[in-house]
Image (cartoon, rainbow, N blue to C red):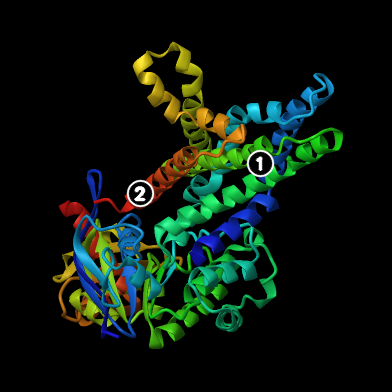
Amino acid sequence: MNAALTIAKREIRTYFNSPIAYIVLTVFLLLAGYLFFGSLFIERQADLRSYFNLMPLLLAFIVPAMAMRLIAEEKGSGSLEMLITMPVPDWQVIVGKFLAGMALLAVMVGLTLCYAATVMAVGPLDKGPAIGGYLGVLLMGGTYMAIGVMASTFTRNQIVAFIIAFAISFALYLFYRLLPFTPESLRPVLSYLSVESHFEAISKGVIDSRDIIYYLSVMVVSLVIATVSLESRKWK
Amino acid sequence: MPELMIQVENLTKVYGATRAVDDVSFNVRKGEVLGFLGPNGAGKSTTMKVLTCYLAPTGGRAKVAGFDVFDDSLEVRKHLGYLPEDTPLYKDMTVLEYLQFAAAMRGMASDRSAKRIKEIGGRCGLHEVAGKLVGELSRGYRQRAGLAQAMLDDPDILILDEPTSGLDPNQIVEIRQLIKEVGKEKTVILSTHILPEVQATCSRILIISSGKLVADGTPDELRARERGSRYRLVMEASGTTAEAVKARLVGIKGVSRCEPVRGEDGAHSFTLDAAGDEDLRKVLFRAAVDNKWTLLELHREAVSLETVFRNLTTREEVKS
């Protein structure tokens, strides 16, 4: 696991040494701030619901942008060859990259904790939904991140990686929106696959192991596919 | 530690329809500096990528330090230092940070890694650029940083893909010296298409062409394989043209090729190739006397490695 942490450390530094982290954080905070303060000042509602409500869609867009460079950039520049000929198992490379993305996500989401503080300053904060919401954002973001890492192993082109990750993430988001139009028999399946239905439950403050298992299993499956994809260079 | 550091048996690598490496077998013993020679696209890099576990072979097997590159890839990589072609290092790190990263990735203990970085950094002449970003380094320094990274964990085997490409003559001499020194205790494989390079550094040469191994031996052995010699001839021949002289020279028994070359004013200069072992100097002198040419220069040299290389690699192309 040491190598994964070494890789993660390096990636985090790269994020913050280049404009990427700052651009992503700025865009995210602008949009999230608009949602939160919009409802605070215009609708005079001091809660986090409008902020959390849009997270499934917003993160489906932002997280692929954070993840796209993780492997694709190294494939393009050739440094991947240097990295994976070091005595480190391929899965640790994937996990290291994923952890770096998660660290950036945590910083991003952490900065929005000031919204919770704002709510507390002007009224009572509903603790359950707030804790559940932040946890849900991290789990859902992590799911998108794992998908993003996976897409990033497919190509040397970062834009292509972004589009693949966004398409998959958006599809997972869209399932929930499609529920009213789908036949009765498909609904439970679609609802289970949707990121949003699980997020909705968690952000109400209901922390159900089934929802957590859903997120964790999508993450694990994506990272396993990412590892296999990295190893596919060795297929005969 | 086994005496045979690298064993390659019937190695084949196919990309789509092309056979990049075709049934190549060779062994490398401890303490050998092996030069991997071949035209661009001959399969040198591919073979190295298989040995460093970056690619898996389509057929055959390869063992490094006694471990199979496919089944025990992690063990293989622990014994290897690798410098890929074009030295793809992380541009956003300083040289020191990069070496620290490489040490951590190799699981080196921190006190040992600090000591090794200092030692190797000194040997590769990196101290003055330790704080510089890799992306700002000149080609030569980047190459040295890559070399330092490969040697960091004191590996038993070094695999270097074109280690001197893009360096200036002074740097080339330094890097060669370094490789020679390392080669005394370690096993080194380096690829190149620069012939003087192998002559200067390698104890053994493999020549690969279109994916096939066409020669394997010490530089002297390879030169001995190719019989024949080359002559340089400068003469004055008033009243005749270079063409006429050439026609006479080609007519001499044993001469396989005759090329006029640019020489001094008023003199005709030629290079002659002879296929046999026989010394043609006497015959050439006599021919000059008979034709009333004034011989200014006559020089015989043994085949160069260059000729060997050209013959071996172009012959293959014709065949395939």
Secondary structure of the residue carrying tag 1 is helix
Disc 1 target residue: A131
Disc 2 with disc 1 on a shared chain:
yes
Camera-nearest residue between A161 and A169: A169
* CB-based contact (under 8 Å), mark 2 and mark 1: no
Q: Residues within 10 Å of mark 2 (few under 14, many from 20)?
A: some
In this rendering, does residue A15 appear at all?
A: yes
Q: B238 left or right of A58?
A: left
Camera-nearest residue between B229 and B284: B229
Disc 2 target residue: A228
Q: In which chain is the residue bearing label 2?
A: A
Camera-nearest residue between B194 and B255: B194
Q: Where is B2 relative to A211, above or below? A: below
Indicate the quadrant where residue A136 lies: top right
Q: In which chain is the residue bearing label 1?
A: A
Give the residue at x 21% y 79%. Answer: B224
- Residue B155 is marked as none
Q: B277 left or right of A50?
A: left
Give the residue at x 64% y 27%. Answer: A53
Q: Where is A6 relative to A211, above or below? A: below
Q: Amino acid at mark 1?
A: Ile
Q: Amino acid at mark 2?
A: Val
Camera-nearest residue between A193 and B174: A193
Indicate the quadrant where residue B226 lies: bottom left
C-alpha separation, residue under disc 2 versus residue under disc 1? 35 Å
